[in-house]
Image: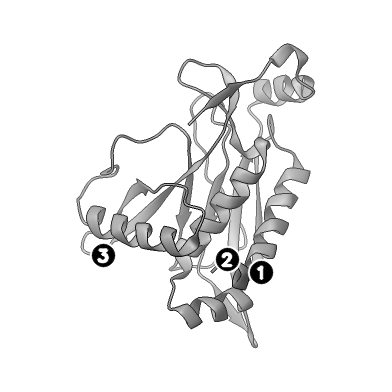
């Protein structure tokens, strides 16, 4: 992984960044993604929805620098050359969860296999972070499959310096012959605007609609 330092003084976003970082302004947007085509394609190949969701989100985040912009451990501002997914898995025995990560793999079939291997190895450990070391270049992804929602907000209170996106999915629902998945995106206004949030949601819908191309 490579962390590319941003020259803050000559950065086109300098005024926006400093203003919203000082205000510690974050915002969230929730959308219902039509996953009708995606569900049909997943069923054909006996794939699961959650790893497909993680895969799509990871591809979108890696496609735009704004979603990879962050502070490193030394406090430098920059952007990662690659982002890895860090996602939650549920332990049915204790009703708790663990957060694990998987590599960013370009082929979904290979990612799905890696996902299943990681879940089998690390689920039920009783640990919040069983897979170590945790890479710095990761984004938090989770799903709440027991309940749908029209809005969701998750805040990381670390002085307003967490700049990477936070993505949460909910329980999908059926309306007539179509299936919809609620997805919430939490982002820091210092590095992303409403435009970037819209790009994320539109790309996610496109990935779901074009799922036959990558499944």
Is residue 20 among the parts visible in the rendering?
yes
Q: Is residue 158 above or below residue 52?
A: above
Depth order, front residue of 76/172: 76
Circle number at residue 210? 1
Displayed quadrant of residue 189: top right
Would residue 157 be found to the left or right of residue 59 on screen?
left
Seen at 28% across and 44% down, the residue is 128
Viewer-nearest of discs 2 and 1: 2
Residue behind mark 2: 214
Q: Position of residue 168 (x, y in %)?
A: 52, 54
**Regarding mark 2 in the picture, which secondary structure is present there?**
loop
Seen at 74% across and 39% down, the residue is 193
How many numbered markers are drawn?
3
Q: Is residue 81 above or below residue 180?
A: above
Depth order, front residue of 116/105: 105
Displayed quadrant of residue 11: top right
Q: Is residue 146 above or below residue 70?
A: below
Q: Position of residue 176 (x, y in %)?
A: 65, 87
First reached walking from the N terminus: tag 3 or tag 1: 3
Residue behind mark 3: 92
């Amino acid at each position: 992984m490579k962390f590319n330092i941003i020259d803050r003084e000559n950065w086109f976003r300098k005024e926006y960044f400093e203003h919203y970082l000082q205000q510690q302004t974050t915002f969230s947007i929730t959308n219902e993604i039509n996953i009708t085509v995606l569900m049909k394609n997943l069923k054909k190949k006996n794939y699961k929805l959650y790893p497909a969701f993680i895969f799509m989100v990871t591809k979108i985040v890696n496609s735009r620098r704004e979603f990879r912009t962050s502070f490193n451990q030394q406090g430098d501002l920059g952007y990662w050359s690659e982002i890895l997914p860090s996602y939650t898995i549920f332990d049915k025995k204790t009703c708790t969860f663990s957060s694990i990560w998987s590599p960013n793999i370009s082929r979904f079939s290979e990612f799905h296999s890696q996902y299943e291997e990681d879940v089998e190895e690390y689920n039920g450990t009783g640990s919040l972070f069983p897979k170590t070391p945790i890479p710095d270049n990761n984004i938090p992804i989770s799903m709440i499959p027991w309940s749908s929602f029209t809005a969701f907000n998750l805040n990381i209170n670390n002085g307003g310096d967490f700049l990477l996106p936070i993505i949460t999915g909910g329980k999908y629902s059926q309306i007539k012959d179509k299936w919809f998945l609620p997805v919430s995106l939490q982002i820091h206004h210092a590095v992303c605007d409403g435009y970037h949030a819209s790009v994320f949601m539109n790309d996610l819908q496109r990935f779901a609609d074009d799922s036959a191309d990558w499944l």
